[in-house]
Amino acid sequence: MKVMVSLPDELLKRIDEEAKRTGRTRSGLLQYAARLYLTEKATRVPPGERPEVQAAMARAKEIIRRPPPDPDAPDSTQIIREARDTRYGPGETSTGRRREAGS
């Protein structure tokens, strides 16, 4: 079957160059490109349907549903800083260097 299509000049030029480079006719290249596109499109899984995306979304929903942290719970950052200061002294690290303020 023959079909007439309109293509921009630049696209047609690129098609002809690729056909020549690959040893195909213009028609053969367009048939190949159409088959490739349709096969890929038929086998492509949309991102939202990919199992790893669905699993990540389920984990995110679970996190969102969790109750907020207890406001009276101890601050883990403060506990770590206090333990570090007890071990090395305020403002020092295990290498004896001074820590910068806020770290």
Image (cartoon, rainbow, N blue to C red):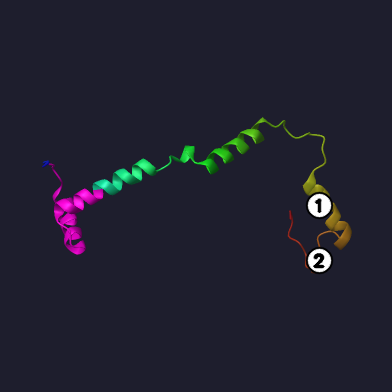
Mark 2 → mark 1, Cα distance in angstroms: 14 Å
Residue 59 in percent (x, y) is at: 62, 38
Left or right, residue 47 beside residue 21 = right
> Residue type at mark 2?
Ser
> Residue type at mark 1?
Ile
Residue beneath disc 2: 94
Element at badge 2? loop
Residue beneath the point at 81% across and 52% down: 80
Mark 1 residue crowding within 10 angstroms, few (<14) / some (14–19) / many (20+): few
As for residue 21 lying within the magenta part, the answer is yes
Residue 21 in percent (x, y) is at: 20, 63
Which residue of the protein is positioned furthest toward the right in this rendering? 86
Secondary structure predominantly adopted by residues drawn in magenta: helix
Query: Quick one: quadrant of the C terminus?
Result: bottom right
Residue beneath disc 1: 80
Depth order, front residue of 42/57: 42
Depth order, front residue of 42/8: 42
Residue beneath the point at 15% across and 45% down: 7
Residue beneath the point at 72% across and 32% down: 68
Q: Which residues are magenta?
A: 5-33
